[in-house]
Image (tube, rainbow, N blue to C red):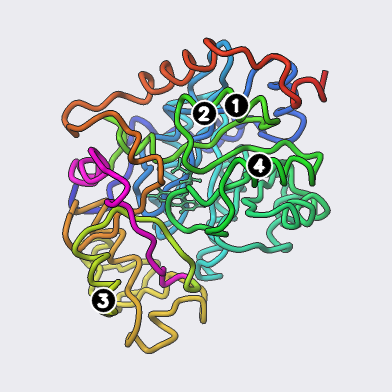
Amino acid sequence: MDCVETAPASAVTSLEDVRRRAPRLDRGAIEEVIRSGKRLLVQGAMGIHASDGLSGKVAAWRGPRLVGVGTISAVVKSEAHLRSEIRRARADAPSGFVGMNLMAAINRQEFDTCLRIAFEEGVSFVVQGAGISRDVVRTCREAGIPFAGIVSSGRLAKMYEKWGAEFLVAEGAEAGGHIGDVGHPLPALLAEVVASTSLPVIAAGGIDADDLPSLFAAGAAGAQLATRFLACADGDAHPNFKQMHLGKRDDDVVLITSTVKGMKARAVRNKFTEALAAGKAFPPRSKAWAYGKEGYHGRRKACVECLATDLCICRATNFQESFCITDALLLAALKGDMENGLFYTGQSVTRLPETDAGKLPTVLEIMELLESRVAAADWAEAPAAAALS
Ligand SMILES: Cc1cc2nc3c(=O)[nH]c(=O)nc-3n(C[C@H](O)[C@H](O)[C@H](O)COP(=O)(O)O)c2cc1C
């Protein structure tokens, strides 16, 4: 795929339809799922198109032990593209839970636009990563949209509960993309967060099918997986993007310093990550190939100011240091440029069994596998279920 495509017209439903069918994923809805002996299986949002086309397919899953939840990434999408992705997911899962992920670090103007679209389209929840903001929790509450916070400590969990979040995602150091705290692996983090809050907690980071029963037994209301869904026949990501995540070993995975606030991020090692490790800078290049002549939200310069002022190291150093994250992620997911693209990934990439991008399972097959692993294990007496019964 060479440019940012939108969903076919046939997949787009009317705004009224969308509103009518948006189920809220709030604390009460999650507690009801748990009372029925099930857990949530959440597809984690993957920025800059990596998860486009997956959310509705995951949200459509309702199995004996798992309820699917899709999350659309809002970052660096045009207004039309974001609306189109939400409606496409709704068409795929008319009564499923479909949320929207917003990075706190993005340009404030786009952040507000994305929130407005979330309200207008009536998504099931808004989840925020890469930073925290009390304002956004308040705005979501006022608009009646459940808010979920991504946390890397019990302290943050307590703060979000006080502010009015409906549920939390405890994201451990094994996760893909930006990592809140590289020293905090998931099992210990989950225990800390569950002990710090009465809110439902979704576990995320490095999870594969075999891990699900123990996480549920440890009190998780659900699990969030992203990397597993990269190696999938469905989804719009370029075939080379999918191939880059297959057959990887521990030494194929690296931590880089992101241009976003200097956060650590996990990626597949390639020529680009090696150049970053050697201190090379990559100033922004024209994105006309991806956004067309109208530019990104009307911005046509090489730097489209996608991140909030001062949060982008590349911009803050007048393009002398770091790299343009939008260029690098677009090259990976849209162009499939295996040398110059940045391929974010989770630590569980080394456990993906597939090796050929031409023979990947569909979302449905992945969900069947996850469901079968949970069904085979006995976690009925898990603390989360016991606490709510
Ligand atoms: C390619 C990629 C892009 C991601 N982009 C985002 C993002 O834009 N916002 C966010 O909050 N999390 C993002 N994540 C994190 C995932 O949503 C998820 O929580 C995490 O990767 C879960 O760990 P796993 O990949 O090991 O399953 C991204 C992860 C990957 C692999």
Question: For the point 47% across and 73% down, which residue is it?
Answer: 262
Vertical order, 337 against 64 (above or below): below
Element carrying mark 3 = loop
Q: Which residue is mark 3?
A: 278
Q: Is mark 4 within 8 Å of ligand 1?
A: no
CA–CA distance between discs 2 and 1?
6 Å
**Does 346 lie within the magenta span?**
no
CA–CA distance between discs 4 and 1?
11 Å
Q: Which mark is residue 214?
A: 1
CA–CA distance between discs 4 and 3?
35 Å
Q: Which residue is mark 4?
A: 190
Nearer-N-terminus badge (4/3): 4
Question: For the point 24% across and 39% down, which residue is it?
Answer: 246
The crowding category of the residue bearing disc 2, from other C-alpha atoms within 10 Å (few below 14, some 14 to 19, many at least 20), is: some
Vertical order, 67 against 314 (above or below): above
Question: For the point 45% across and 76% down, which residue is it?
Answer: 312
Element carrying mark 4 = helix
Q: Which residue is mark 2?
A: 211
Picture mark count? 4
Nearer-N-terminus badge (2/3): 2
Counting from the top left corner in percent of width and height, residue 82 is at 43, 49
Counting from the top left corner in percent of width and height, residue 320 is at 32, 87
Viewport quadrant of the C terminus: top right
CA–CA distance between discs 4 and 2?
13 Å
Q: Are dots 2 and 1 in contact, CB under 8 Å? A: yes
Counting from the top left corner in percent of width and height, residue 230 is at 33, 39
Range of residues picked out in magenta: 238-260
